[in-house]
Amino acid sequence: MEYLSKQRYDEIAAELKHLVSEVYPKVKDDLAEASAQGDRSDNAGYREARRIQAKTISRIRFLQKILEHSRVINSDALPKDRVSLLSKVEFTNLTTNTRMTFEIVSPHEMDLDAGKISLKSPIGAALMGKKVGEIAEAHVPSGLLRLRIESITMDY
C-alpha cells in the first residue's frame, strides 16, 4: 500500500484518463493506418506504431496499478511534532555543517529538483519519526550521515 498526496493522486488519475480517452485511440488509429499499408514485415511505420502502442499500454497499466494500490493521505491524522509523510524537514548535516530542507513524500512523488525525497530513501527513512533536535543517522553509499533536525513544518 502506497500513500499519495491528494494532488499527486489527482495528477496520476488525470494522466491515466488522458492516455485512455485521447492518446490510446489515436495510437490505435495510427496502427490501423500503418497496417493497411501492406506487408508488415517491411513496414517501418507499422513497427513504430506497434512500439508506441506497447509503450502506451504499459504506461496505462502502470498508472492503473499505482491507483489500485494507493490511498490518499489523511493529512489531519499525521503527527505535527514528528517527521512523517508530507513533512517539510530542515536539517543540518553534522559532518559538513550544511543545512538542507526536503519534503518527505511517497516514492511516486519523489522529485529532488523540487526538494521532495522518498520516505523509502536512506535519508527519508532515517528522518521518519524523529523530532526537532534529534539526530538521525542515514546510511548512504558514501558512508554514514548524521543529521540534526532543525525544524518540521507541514505545508498541506
Image (cartoon, grey):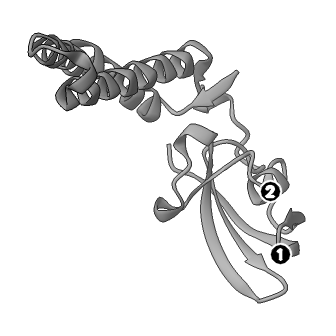
Q: What residue is shown at x 18% (from left), y 15% (from top)?
A: 39
Quadrant assignment, res 69:
top right
Name the element at disc 2: helix
Q: Residues within 10 Å of mark 2 (few under 14, many from 20)?
A: some
Which residue reaches farthest bottom?
A: 96
Q: Mark 2 points at which residue?
A: 122
**Quick check: can you spot residue 121?**
yes
**Rendered location of residue 90, percent (x, y):** 66, 68
Horizontal relation, residue 111 to residue 124: left or right: left
User: Which is nearer the eye, 46 or 51?
Assistant: 46
Name which residue type carries label 2.
Pro
Q: Quadrant of the N terminus?
A: top right
Q: In which quarter of the image is residue 120?
A: top right
Residue visible at 42% across and 26% down in the picture:
59
State yes or no: discs 2 and 1 in contact (Cβ < 8 Å). no
Q: Which mark is residue 142?
A: 1
Q: Is residue 148 above or below residue 106?
A: below
- In the depicted view, which residue is nearer to us: 115 or 83? 115
In percent of width and height, residue 56 lies at 35, 24
- Residue 18, how many percent across, how many down? 25, 22
| Residue 87 pos. (x, y %) | 64, 50
